[in-house]
Every structure is written in structure tokens, then in C-alpha cells.
Image (cartoon, rainbow, N blue to C red):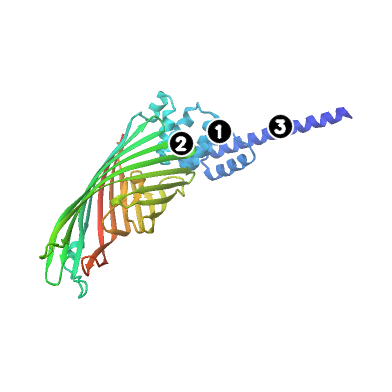
Amino acid sequence: MRLILIYCLLFLAFHSLSQEKRTYSTVDMDSYEEYLLKDYRALKKTSRKALKSGIDFYLLRMRIAILAYEHHNYTKALRHFKKAYEMNPNDSIVQEYLYFSFLLDDQYEESRIFALSLNDKMQTKIGFKKKNLESVSISSSFGFNENIAQNLMKNNYTPEYKNVQSKFIGNSYKFGLLLNHSIGRRVQISNGFTYFGISSTSLIQTPFSRFTENYLDSYLQYNFGLGIQMKKGWNLSGGLGFYHSKSSWFTIVPNFMMGPPRLETLINNYNNISFSSTISKRMNYFLTSISFHFSNLLNQNQSQGEFNLTYYPFGNSRFFSTSSFSVLKDTILRTVFSEKIGMKCGKRILIEGEGGFGDFTNKFTSNGFIIYNTQDKITSQIGANIHFYSKKKFEFIASYYFQSRVGINYLFLNKTDYKSVNYKYNNNNLTITLKWNF
């Protein structure tokens, strides 16, 4: 009786083992045939059932990953190439595929970190070169509007408020330089230098006289950024900004020694700073980030929180959308919402459309490298960016934005009592950027 029981247990164990081998063998043959036929849909079903049943091996991962790669779903390809790499990290084929999957999925830092872990021969094969200076960008921007022409000659005084003081913002120009460096495998440093000037006309008007003065306000900006690429897709970054602004204002100064008041130009110089921090993570088809900013622009403390969510529905950057929501707090609480949609046209053109609304006053993005510190409030904007990529790692970017702005007229009853009256105008901004990726 005991011998019969032992025999039955051995038979069941052998049958179970042979059944497992048969299942593994079936998956291997089916997946190989589907891979040869380039039947991506069937191979996805086969691999999904196999992995759910606990059957997992290197060739299965490579087959589904390669077909996903060929269908430009780099997000799905990465998931399987990573598993294949864990099983066989010395295989040059999976090394090469994994590097280019990171690169084509716009995970540039991950691709660089992975390439640095490979030997010199493999780095040469994939065309990777060790470098400290990653990229250099120069940009030039020109803003233009009809604000001065439309509003300068209007009579804004009333029988009660007969003294009106206004400053009308006109055209502007900007020049920028951005340097991106890498230190070691996981650290990135950015240095940004920006100068922009804004022309304006100040006005003092009464029922009997009108005085104007033209000015050119200037702004200097330096930004330092530090980024650390963590494991499992996490990224920590921060920014420090220094801002110097010089602006002029035409005003009436009372004469306390008797006699009529005099007109005088007041010059304001501000030196301010900003601090920014961002944490982000790439999770398959989503890239999420949370940012915090603090600044004292124009000597007014302001804090800001921002949430960004980027979605890659097809597992690549051929089409994506980014939603952004910001909350700003200075003397009041303000919100800004924006949406960006990007689409690649062929291999060398990327088109992005963007729109947003809210109170953009002193809004920060990109760890302080971009800031909306115009004198007049921006209430909404819509625009587009076109990227042209050359074969030699050169990038040309043309950007256009249409902004709705709000200016202010100050109506004085006497030296201390006044009220402000808003008016609206539109501003156009065109920017050209040249970028060299080394």
C-alpha cells in the first residue's frame, strides 16, 4: 500500500513537471512564430497570458519588446527590455535596444545614465560620447502691440478725477543664453542668462494739459539649476534665480515751498531672488511633477505651487499632452491653468500648441528659468512652437504667443486719494531659438 502511494505521488510530480515543460515549450514556439510573422497583436496576447501564468523568460521579453519598439511604442518596449536586461545584462543586443528606447521615449537623462554604465566598445557602437557640456541654446525674442497707439491719446479724466497718471507698455525685446552641463552619471547643472528691455510711454494729463515721457526699462536675470536623476524614474531638481530690474515712472511731485507742482521721473531699482524645487517621476505613459517656488520680485513675497501631468497615449513623443495647474499667493490667491498638445510630423518636425488662462503675474515655470514678470498683468495666452531637428544634433525653434493683457490708469482726486481703472490690450511675442546638442 505504501509503495502504491509513493508511486502515485511520483507520477503526479512527473506529470506536473512535464505539463509545465510543455506549457513553456508551447509559449516559446508560439511567441517565436508570432515574432517571425510580425504579429504584434497576437504576441501581446501570448505574452500577457504567459506572464499571468508565471511563465517568463528572456526570449519572450525580447520578442515582445522588439515588436513594441518597431511599432514605436517605446514605453511598452522599455518595460520588457528592462526585464530582459535583468535576466541577461551582458547581451549587447538588449543593451543597444534599451539605450535607444530610453532615447526615443524622451528619457534623455536615463539614456545617458545607462550609456555611461556600458563599456567603451558598446558606447562607440551606439554613438554615445562622454561630455560635460550637453547643450547650448541662444534665443532672441520680440514683443509688439498697439497699446501706446490705441490708448495714449484717450482722455481718461473725469470732472471729479482730473489728474490722470498712466504708463503704457509698448514693444519689447529679449536675448537669452542657456548652458546645460553634466557632472558624473546623475547630476545636471544649468546656467541661464537673460536680458530684456521694454519700451514705455508715461502720461500725465489734466483737462488743460498733457505731458508724456518715453522710457526703456531693463531687466537682467541669472538662473542656476541643479537636477539629480534618482533610481526608478524619480528626478529631483531645484533652481536659484537672481533678478535686477530698472524701471521709470513719470509723476507729479508736490511743491511744499509754495508754487506749482513739478514733473519728475522716478527710477526704481530692484534686486530680487527666487527659489524653486521640483520632484518628478515617469510612470509608463505618464510623467508627473510637483513644483514649489518662492520669490520676492518687486520686494513683494510670493509663493507658488504647480502640478504638471504629461500623457503619452501611444507610448512615444509623436503625440502627447501636458496639463498644468498653478496656485499663486502674494496679497491675494490666484490660479493659472494651461494645456499643451504636441505632435511630431515626420522625423524632424515637432509642433506644439499651448493655451492658458488665469492671472500670470510673476508666474514661474521650469524652476524659475521662465517667468512672467511683465508690468501689466497677463490674463490669457495662446501660442505654438515649431521644432526643426537636423541630422547633426542642431535644433531650430520658432515660437509665437498671443497674450491678453490688462493695463492700469490711475485717477487722482488729490495727492493721496485715487482710484485705478483697468483697460485691456493684446500683445504678440515671437521667439527664435537655436540649440546645439553636443
Q: Amino acid at mark 3?
A: Leu
Q: Judge the density around disc 2: few (<14), some (14-19), many (≥20) Cα neighbours within 10 Å.
A: some
Q: Which of pointers 2 and 3 indicates the residue nearer the eye?
A: 2
Q: Secondary structure at mark 2?
A: loop
Q: Which residue is mark 2?
A: 230
Question: Residue furthest toward the left?
Answer: 259
Q: Which residue is mark 1?
A: 59
Q: Secondary structure at mark 3?
A: helix
Q: Position of residue 33 (x, y in %)?
A: 56, 37
Which quadrant does the C terminus fall into? top left
Question: Residue furthest toward the bottom?
Answer: 159
- In front here: 388 or 11? 388
- In front here: 221 or 301? 301
Report the residue at 48% width, 31% height from top. Answer: 94
Task: Choose top left, top right, bottom left or bottom right for residue 99.
Answer: top left
Q: Amino acid at mark 2?
A: Met
Q: Which of pointers 1 and 2 indicates the residue nearer the eye?
A: 2
Residue 146 visible somewhere in the drawing: no
Question: Residue furthest toward the right?
Answer: 1
Lower sequence index among marks 3 and 1: 3
Which quadrant does the N terminus fall into? top right
Task: Choose top left, top right, bottom left or bottom right for residue 113.
Answer: top left
Q: Secondary structure at mark 1?
A: helix
Q: Amino acid at mark 1?
A: Leu
Residue 94 lies, with reference to residue 40, above or below; the image says above
Lower sequence index among marks 2 and 3: 3
Q: Which residue is mark 3?
A: 17
Residue 435 lies, with reference to residue 298, above or below; the image says above
For residue 91, side relative to residue 423 (left or right): right
Q: How many marks?
A: 3
Q: Judge the density around disc 3: few (<14), some (14-19), many (≥20) Cα neighbours within 10 Å.
A: few
